[in-house]
Image (cartoon, coloured by chain):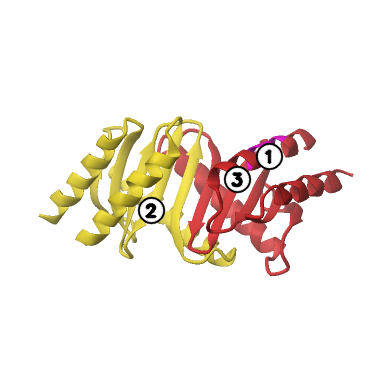
Chain colours: A yellow, B red
Amino acid sequence: MRADMLTAVLHDLNGTSADIEASGVISTDGLMMAAVLPATLDEDRVGAMSAAMLSLGDRSAKELERGTLEQVLIKGDHGYVLMTYAGDEAVLTVMAKPNAKLGLIFLDVKRAAESIASML
Amino acid sequence: MRADMLTAVLHDLNGTSADIEASGVISTDGLMMAAVLPATLDEDRVGAMSAAMLSLGDRSAKELERGTLEQVLIKGDHGYVLMTYAGDEAVLTVMAKPNAKLGLIFLDVKRAAESIASML
């Protein structure tokens, strides 16, 4: 089943680094396709915030001459949210700890996004 | 004059790397305080998009348990937009080329943001 394959990719991704706390695959209209989240994070909330950030990110990238949106990264004092397009229909959202090694996270997330795009 | 001091910091910042194409200091309500932008980029547009992204970034950071927002990074296929708080009242927005070395940009922007915060 496709949902199981997506969930397996997310489990692998969360397992590549102790810095990754949660991940989800969300349709570009904000509906959750698969998620591996801690109990404290609500699926609908992750979906809704991801869709809103991507929509505004799309517009910002265009208005500020940055071309087609590929990623949005949010850094708070308690950690990161990284949203990456996985093909045209879906977005991979990952939450990571404040001291995460961003270079490794970018690499692992890029690979996972490619893998997810090939399944959809 | 304070506006001249801010502009001088932005000129220095744009000069640290050929990858930085534009920068501006914007109040958290979206009004431009100082800017060093190419003629193709409109000040009001940069201010408005920065304020909108930060407002939604603030909310996303809180809803997704990432604490207080510090930075938002947008990656498009034609380059980056990096928004960083410079104190509580202002934001430093920087636009960089697609192949920019992010590690260096983060470092230079962090220093410039600290310098700007000390002036406001």
Secondary structure under the numbered disc 2 in the rendered image:
strand
> Residue at 60% of width from left, 58% of height from top?
B49
- Assess disc 1: are there few (<14), some (14-19) or many (≥20) residues with their C-alpha within 10 Å of its C-alpha: many
Residue A20 percent location from the top left of the image: 34, 35
Residue A48 percent location from the top left of the image: 37, 51
The N terminus of chain A appears in which quarter of the rendering? bottom left
Chain of the residue under the numbered disc 2 shown in the image: A
Q: Say whether residue B57 is magenta.
A: no
Amino acid type, callout 3: Ile
Secondary structure under the numbered disc 1 in the rendered image:
helix
Chain of the residue under the numbered disc 3 shown in the image: B
Instruction: Check contact, mark 1 vs mark 2: CB within 8 A.
Output: no
Tag on residue A100? none
Amino acid type, callout 1: Ala
Secondary structure under the numbered disc 3 in the rendered image:
helix
Horizontal placement of A45 versus B112: left or right? left
Query: Looking at the magenta stretch, what is its main secondary structure?
Result: helix
Instruction: Check contact, mark 3 vs mark 1: CB within 8 A.
Output: no
Badge 1 and badge 2 both on one subunit? no
> Residue at 76% of width from left, 47% of height from top?
B12
The answer for how far apart the CA atoms under marks 2 and 3 are is: 20 Å
Horizontal placement of A46 versus B109: left or right? left
Q: Disc 2 designates what residue? A: A84
Vertical side of B18 occupied by A63: above or below: below
Which segment did they paint magenta? B109-114
The answer for how far apart the CA atoms under marks 3 and 1 are is: 12 Å
Q: Disc 1 designates what residue? A: B113
Tag on residue B105? 3
Q: Quadrant of residue B104?
A: top right
> Residue at 47% of width from left, 47% of height from top?
A73
